[in-house]
Image: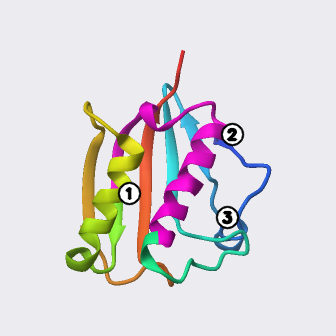
Amino acid sequence: MSQRDVIDLPQRHALYDAHGYSPAVRAGELLFVSGQVGSRDDGSPEPEFEPQVRRAFANLGNVLAAAGLGFDDVVDVSTFHTDPTTQFDTIMKVKGEVFGAAPYPTWTAIGVTWLAGFDFEIKVVARLRS
């Protein structure tokens, strides 16, 4: 098996070690970023929904920055929501602040029943800069 080209963070939240996954892995010209939640450094969730979404995007931004990338490099987004009907407006507000104007990355929103104590998760694929 070949060695994974892992992007790591100097300050990792506790979930990476607790659940055994890497923040991101480079593969060819792409960066695959693990799902990011609104986790504080100790792994606990932000208790209110909008701050949890904002922290998930901030955690994502930290992983992208560790790879020398930003949100403009994201080509594909998957988000996971525990209650899409009531959460959608908040998610669209924060997503709009982060991704700004078109052209937008692709996006798939998925309703789920469980996110290990969280209510929102975002996973992306980004294009590496040459």
> Label 3: which residue?
16
Q: Position of residue 20 (x, y in %)?
A: 66, 66
Q: Position of residue 127 (x, y in %)?
A: 45, 29
Q: Which residue shows up at 24% across the image and 79% down it?
A: 86
Q: Position of residue 92 (x, y in %)?
A: 28, 58
Q: Position of residue 51 (x, y in %)?
A: 50, 70
Image quadrant assignment for residue 50 = bottom left
Marks 3/2: CA–CA distance: 18 Å
Q: Is residue 76 magenta?
A: yes
Res. 94 mark: 1
Residue type pointed to by label 3 = Tyr
Q: Secondary structure at mark 1?
A: helix
Q: Which residue shows up at 26% across the image and 30% down it?
A: 103
Residue type pointed to by label 2 = Gln
Seen from the viewer's position, the closer of residues 53 and 129 is: 53
Seen from the viewer's position, the closer of residues 120 and 22 is: 120
Q: Residue furthest top?
A: 130
| Of labels 1 and 3, the one closer to you | 1
Magenta range: 51-78
CB under 8 Å between discs 1 and 3:
no
CB under 8 Å between discs 2 and 1:
no
> Label 2: which residue?
3
* Quadrant housing the N terminus: top right
Seen from the viewer's position, the closer of residues 9 and 92 is: 92
